[in-house]
């Protein structure tokens, strides 16, 4: 089974500052990688995904992530955050099956 | 837009009751999933279904069962609710086969078992 580690449980950040959320996974086989976001009182929605090709993936709302196979990482970044980016962020990994394995989540709180 | 709806946002049940959580998707997706979400643990897969009447156990199926009689509807059943099943339950659906496709999530049902 896949294992996903999100290295930070809470990330406070000021508005317009950059943010990086770290994600590592354990696998020696091909994987698909995802970042989902959960806004308060809502379900999850997809931010971006890596299936193959370029290791730099761009998603919605100005987020991007970089796949690093040698370090088994898939860190999420945004150069300038807004108050509306306050949410919980989940990294997830899938092998060739149907199942997604999720990390424990990182809560991002953006302050003015 | 894909829409996944769950029958209740909040539910309070007593220990030992039989509980039904309903999920409906409107995009003709083959795959449907039930997760529970707990603080510090992220989302854990309970059961999933890749076709009508087909089901597969996820990582934490104990104490739960599921039913999928129609393609658009996937039900989670707690045969005898216990306090350790107090949690947020999320339903999701996806198209296609395998782990490539985006999962679309419902808003969740917060279940409290007293």
Image (cartoon, rainbow, N blue to C red):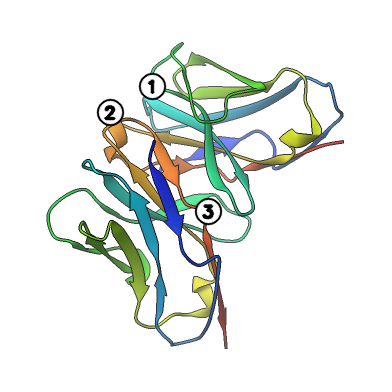
Give the class, few, some or many, for how many residues have Cα within 10 Å of label 3's Cα (few <14, many ≥20). Answer: many
Q: Secondary structure at mark 3?
A: loop
Kindly identify the residue that appears in the image at 29 percent across and 37 percent down. A95
Residue A44 lies left or right of residue A60; in this view the side is: right
Tag of residue B50: 1
Quarter of the image with the N terminus of chain A is top left
Give the class, few, some or many, for how many residues have Cα within 10 Å of label 2's Cα (few <14, many ≥20). Answer: few
Residue B101 figure quarter: top left
Q: Are labels 1 and 3 on one chain?
A: no
Mark 2 near mark 1, Cβ–Cβ under 8 Å? yes
Residue B94 lies left or right of residue B76; in this view the side is: left
**Gap in angstroms between the C-alphas marked 3 and 2:** 25 Å
Q: Position of residue A27 (x, y in %)?
A: 29, 44
What's the chain of the residue with tag 3?
A: A
What's the chain of the residue with tag 2?
A: B
Q: Which residue is mark 3?
A: A104
**Gap in angstroms between the C-alphas marked 2 and 1:** 8 Å
| Any part of residue A106 in sight | yes
Q: Position of residue B83 (x, y in %)?
A: 80, 34
Q: Position of residue A71 (x, y in %)?
A: 26, 61
Q: Secondary structure at mark 2?
A: loop
Tag of residue B95: none
Q: Which residue is mark 2?
A: B97
Residue nearer the viewer, A64 or A83: A64
Give the class, few, some or many, for how many residues have Cα within 10 Å of label 1's Cα (few <14, many ≥20). Answer: many
């Amino acid at each position: 089974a896949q294992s996903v580690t999100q290295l930070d449980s809470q990330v406070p950040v000021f508005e317009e500052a950059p943010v990086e959320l770290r994600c590592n996974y354990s696998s020696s086989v091909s994987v698909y990688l995802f970042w989902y976001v959960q806004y308060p009182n809502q379900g999850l929605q997809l931010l971006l995904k890596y299936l193959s090709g370029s290791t730099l993936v761009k998603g919605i709302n100005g987020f991007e992530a970089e796949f690093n196979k040698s370090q088994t990482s898939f860190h999420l970044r945004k150069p300038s955050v807004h108050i509306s980016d306050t949410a919980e962020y989940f990294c997830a990994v899938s092998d060739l099956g149907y199942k997604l394995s999720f990390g424990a989540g990182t809560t991002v709180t953006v302050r003015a | 837009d894909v829409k996944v709806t769950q029958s209740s946002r909040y539910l309070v049940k007593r220990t030992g009751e039989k509980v039904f959580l309903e999920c409906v998707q409107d995009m003709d997706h083959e795959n449907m999933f039930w997760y529970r979400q707990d603080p510090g643990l992220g989302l854990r897969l309970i059961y999933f279904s890749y076709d009508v009447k087909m089901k597969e156990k996820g990582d934490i199926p104990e104490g739960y069962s599921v039913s999928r009689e129609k393609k658009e509807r996937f039900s989670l059943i707690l045969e005898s609710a216990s306090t350790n099943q107090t949690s947020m339950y999320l339903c999701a659906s996806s198209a296609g086969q395998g782990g490539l496709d985006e999962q679309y999530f419902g808003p969740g049902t917060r279940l409290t078992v007293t």
